[in-house]
Image: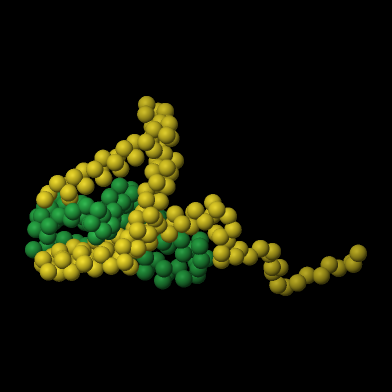
Chain colours: A green, B yellow
Amino acid sequence: MAKRSNEPFLWALFSSGGTVAALLIPVLLFLYGLAFPLGWLAAPSYHSTLALVRHPLTRLVLFVACSLPLFHWAHRFRFTLYDGLQIKHLNEVIILLCYGGALVGAALAGYILWNLP
Amino acid sequence: MKETPIYTEYHPRWYRTRVSTYWWTRQWSYLKFILRELSSLSVAYFVVLTLLELRALSQGEASYAAFQEWLRTPLLVALNGIGLFFVLFHTITWFNLAPRAMPLRVRGKRAPDLLVAALNYVAWLVVSAVVAWLILGGR
């Protein structure tokens, strides 16, 4: 049997991660990165934030919003390095750093969200 | 012409023009492509920031307040502004490419590209509104 490529699987992760990132990240980064720190909008209190984040559905959404976009980054950044810098000879190192980094990040997200007080 | 042609035991070298490492600076469309690809760095940045925020949240009220204070520093505001710009760049290019990446078929016919892109933008608006309502309404 011919060796199957795992490229379609990685592409599916890239594609779903890209969609999740496109839908969720702008509003979250706008609110928590600019609107609340600069005082454009009143930031929710610690307790209401914790109550919202502790909800199982929020945890699930946050896990998806962290893990899938990381695989999107891994795949896209890998090819940015190939095309932009033409460093295809470092193939193994790049693959390890990109997908390995995404795996570590996803595991961290799961750990933090699981262990919320 | 000689009677016996000369053979070389080495394989001839093909002629290939070398592409500069900075090929993408030559033209706006190339630069746009690389900027779009680099938007993935902002996506990764957002995840790192979110993980730090969640960690601060789980460590207690004082730690969360200190994190909010850190977010107010000029460096973080600048990084978040740049990050938001690239993430919006990603969102727009992603939705504009969606009709070509995943053509939608209705009764065997390909739905118009504009319609598919519009549906994506509507979904984006709805998701953003729901998320903002959940965060801002829970006070």
Q: Is residue B113 left or right of residue A112?
A: right
Return the residue found at the far bottom.
B9
Residue B56 drawn at (x, y percent): 17, 67
Return the residue found at the far top.
B107
Q: Quadrant of the C terminus of chain A?
A: bottom left
Q: Nearer the viewer, residue B15 or B8?
A: B15
Residue A99: quarter of image: bottom left
Query: At 35% from the left edge and 58% from the top edge, which residue is drawn?
Result: B81
Query: At 42% from the left edge and 62% from the top edge, which residue is drawn?
Result: A78
Query: At 17% from the left edge and 50% from the top edge, which residue is drawn?
Result: B135
Residue B138 drawn at (x, y percent): 12, 49
Residue B41: quarter of image: bottom left
Q: Nearer the viewer, residue B57 or B101?
A: B57
Residue B34 in sight in this render:
yes
Looking at the picture, does residue A60 appear above or below residue B4? above
Label count reads 0
Residue A4 in sight in this render:
no
Residue A4 drawn at (x, y percent): 40, 56
Q: Is residue B131 left or right of residue B117?
A: left
Q: Quadrant of the N terminus of chain A?
A: bottom left
Residue B26 drawn at (x, y percent): 59, 58
Q: Nearer the viewer, residue A101 or B24?
A: B24
Looking at the picture, does residue B96 appear above or below residue A54? above
Query: At 68% from the left edge and 64% from the top edge, which residue is drawn?
Result: B14
